[in-house]
Image: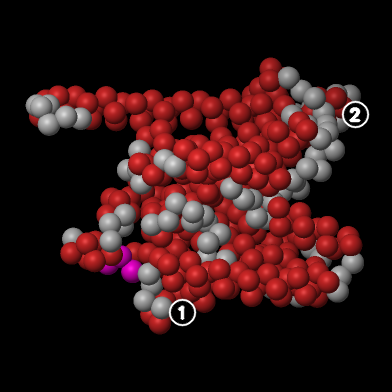
Amino acid sequence: MTGHQSPDDILDEYSRHTGRRFLFLAALAVAVAVLFLVSVTVGTRGLSVAEVFGLLIDHLSGVTYDRATEYGLWFDDNIVWNYRVPRAIFAIVAGAALAVAGAAMQSVMKNPLADPYTTGISSGALLGVAMAMVLGFAVGGSGVDGFGITLNALLFSMVPVLVIVVLGPYINGSPSTLILAGTAVSYLFNSLTSILLVITDQATMATVYRWQVGHLGDLTWDSIPLVLSVTVVGTLVLLALSNRLNVMSLDDRDARALGLDGEGLRMVCLVLLSFMVATVIGYAGVIGFVGLVVPHMVRMVIGSDNRFVIPGSVLFGAAFLLGCDIVSRAMDVSELIPVGVVTAFVGAPVFLYLIVRNRRGVW
């Protein structure tokens, strides 16, 4: 944009730029739909896209199969509808939640290195899982059943956030001090988890490790409603606050001069996005790099306006995690490779590339 452009030229350029943004979002939506169909075909039982599409149409139309006379179709319908579809839907929702939370965290912290786990919620969740499995202590259930472990992970993941909220008035609520407080709480909780793992057996250690790297196995339809509800509500709230998040990129003093309470908004966003991520951790464990890398990639394409970054992160995060889950299952027919390993394997080089490119312009 040059100083010789007329207002009409500026308006035309803005319209073209906005059009490219919407085109990017539409392409991501198509990618999510395609990856969903591909995801449902991948697994120990190989099915084509046409077969899966037919099974889904039949199931939604109310068609049922007799187990005795149509065992093959009954088995395929059961595997697709009760295992692969909820897993794919959860991957879409979890990827969207982590990416949106990462975008919001980077905005309120004014730090491109911030991610959804900056406040220490991942270390809190792991401590909750370790306490349930090693000590048998679980809130609302047995330490050995899925519900007790999930609820423990969810509740303990919010403890670091509550600590930071309580300490907020005493540490002036600036981004740097909040990050340091989150780091301190993470080290404390990680040390407690390490103590518990030292005194346990190898099988329990392996299970806790799966939570530590993130997994999408053993997910059912019951795993979706809470995560979906929290993600939808949280995303809509953050989208409504997108203009204020844009102002948050300024210094707190400048933001205050424009009538924005930066510290208050930061605390509200931290609690909201932390709860979004905590629900994902409660069911799938700690899936890294989605909230760190995806917002950067979105900003490189459509700029730093949160009105577009947030919906872009929703779609890109969903596609990214869904794609990584497909890779994790395609690499190992026994499906023992956790999706968190793939996200780290893909995300780490991408993040290094972004650092080398030094794309500070998107900020």
Numbered label attached to residue 166: 1
User: In this picture, which residue range is highlighted in magenta?
Assistant: 259-264
Q: Is residue 114 magenta?
A: no
x%, y% of residue 136?
A: 80, 73
Above or below for 137 versus 58: below
- The type of residue carrying mark 2 is Ala
Q: Which residue is more in the foreground, 287 or 279?
A: 287
Q: Which residue lies furthest to the front in this view?
A: 356
237 relative to 283 in the view: left or right: left
x%, y% of residue 135?
A: 80, 75
Numbered label attached to residue 148: none
Tell me which corner region of the image, top left, top right, bottom left or bottom right, holds residue 157. Answer: bottom right
Residue positioned 68% across, 70% down in the render: 190
Helix, strand or loop under label 1: helix
Q: Residue at label 2?
A: 68
- The type of residue carrying mark 1 is Val
What scheme was used to colour the molecule?
secondary structure
Q: In which quarter of the image is the N terminus?
A: top left
Ranked by sequence position, the earlier of labels 1 and 2 is: 2
Tell me which corner region of the image, top left, top right, bottom left or bottom right, holds residue 123. Answer: bottom right
Q: Which residue lies furthest to the top in this view?
A: 50
Mark 1 neighbour density, 10 Å: few (under 14) some (14–19) many (20 or more): few
Residue positioned 40% across, 49% down in the render: 236
Mark 2 neighbour density, 10 Å: few (under 14) some (14–19) many (20 or more): few
